[in-house]
Image: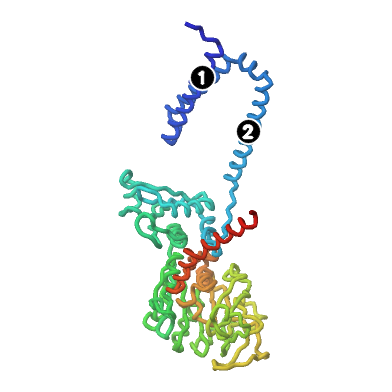
Amino acid sequence: MKKWTRNQWAESIATAGMLVLIGGYAVYSYQGELRLASKALLIGGGVLLLGAIVLGFGGIVGFFSRRSSQLGTNTTILSLAVLAILGLLNFVSYRHHKRFDLTSEKLYTLSDQTKKVLRGLSQDITIVRFAKSPNAQLNDLMTEYKNVSPHIKFENVDPTEKPEVAKEYGATHMGDVIIGAGPKHQPIEPSAGEGPELAYSEQDVTAAIMKVTRNSVKMVCFVTGHGEKLTSDSGAQGYQLVEQGLRKEGYNTNSINLVTENGVPASCDIVVIAGPAQGYFPQEATLVSKYLDGGGKLLIEVDPETDPKLGDIFQAWNINVGNNVVVDASGVGRLFGTGPGTPLVVDYGDSPITKNLQGGMTFFELARTVSIADSAKSDPQAVELLKTSSRSFTIPKLVREVQFNPKTAGPLSLGVAASRQAGDKSSRLVVIGNSAFAENQWLGLQHNGDLFFNTIDWLAQDENLISIRPKPPTARRITLTESQMAALRWFELLLLPGLVILAGVSIWWKRR
């Protein structure tokens, strides 16, 4: 029997060491963590390799002394250097990653509101999806949330394997997604899809986070009885979408009647008077004034050619509500399908309400001017929120044909926000010369919704929620007639292949 040399023993031990290392890595990958078995295999493989190097050290030195080995070594070192550089770049990009969202509506970028909410978290939020298989869309969305805040934790849990977790969170169906913050739990309803491919919107996830992190839920009360906009109205001119949006923001809503309630109920944190068509009784106006003087928070939307009989309140708060109709002669509104009776606002005052709206647009169908009556007065503190273009002007009432009037030309103010101290409380009032901007048909246009909800947040003294909200994606479908479909089929079947063949024949003819 032939006796093995030291080099042969070293090669055999090195081979065994590599196999043991590979086995240890395989066990580690299968178990998902470094346990005793994988540790023993990895350490054993390392010891065998070290022993092989010591045993065959002389052969290794002789091998690298050859010219061919030196060239090979240089190549190996260069390859390892390139791999090291690539690994370092990958590590740096992982720790300091940068993503680019090229979609027109920034569909893969979290909104300003979500980022504000996440950065303001002071406790851990656990989001759990109870299902056997993961949801790719939700996993991607949760990655974005975790990138913004380390307080966000997300996991997929199989309720059949961990029924105790499902019971703790109150999960009753496969596919439930529930947010937990301490003892509080809030389910998230999917926005679209069926079966395992349910889609979850950023709006709903952020709304659920706000609900479980708020210590109390504030009430927004809408006054009724004078033809105001109704939150129960799902028509074009209703305020149903306003109510839905407020609930997503973590508010509760209610409708009140000042006469039957004999004032503003104590449960109302914010009161909204949205476009009254008839005037308030003197005793009702007194009740509203008393509510403000006691530290109330009030939004009044006044449409043109109406008289809500709230002039004493406007006067006491240094606000002038014009008896006019604003006309926008700039023609910009035509790009959005609106006429001169719908002023477009791109200039905003210095207020937390409109700070994030700079550069955006808001639309007001049939508006009247609302401005500061005496700019020299310092009480209350007031700011004009919305300014129309210089090509806007006012007319006494709405008529079919109008001409530009330079005497009443803009910029014109359409809204004022004012505040004053009422003892140890802060009274806040916002007056806007239009109620249509928050109707169902207008709320989703540009920044109309942001203006309304920012106003409520400011009145509620929840300035941390004032932001630009996530927008739903715009449906971009192409609808073709039968003749257009037929023409497209002919193009696909005959014209396109014919052009390719013609190009090929032309190239062959030139080269022959």
Q: Can residue 215 be seen in this view?
A: no
Q: Is mark 1 on a helix, strand or loop?
A: helix
Instruction: Identify the residue at horizontal 69%, vertical 21% (top origin).
Output: 67
Q: Position of residue 373 (x, y in %)?
A: 62, 84
Alpha carbon of mark 2 to alpha carbon of mark 1: how far? 25 Å
Which label belongs to residue 417?
A: none
Instruction: Identify the residue at horizontal 44%, vertical 67% (top origin).
Output: 251
Q: In this view, does 341 lie above or below 161?
A: below
Q: Which amino acid does the dot numbered 1 rest on?
A: Leu
The C terminus is located in which quarter? bottom right
Nearer to us: label 2 or label 1: 2
* Callout 2 touching callout 1 (CB < 8 Å): no
Toward the viewer: 6 or 256? 6
Q: Which amino acid does the dot numbered 2 rest on?
A: Ser
Q: Mark 1 points at which residue?
A: 48
Q: Position of residue 32 (x, y in %)?
A: 43, 36
Q: Name the residue under label 2.
A: 79
Q: Where is residue 30 in the image (x, y as percent from the top left)?
A: 42, 35
Toward the viewer: 382 or 247? 247
Toward the viewer: 401 or 353? 401
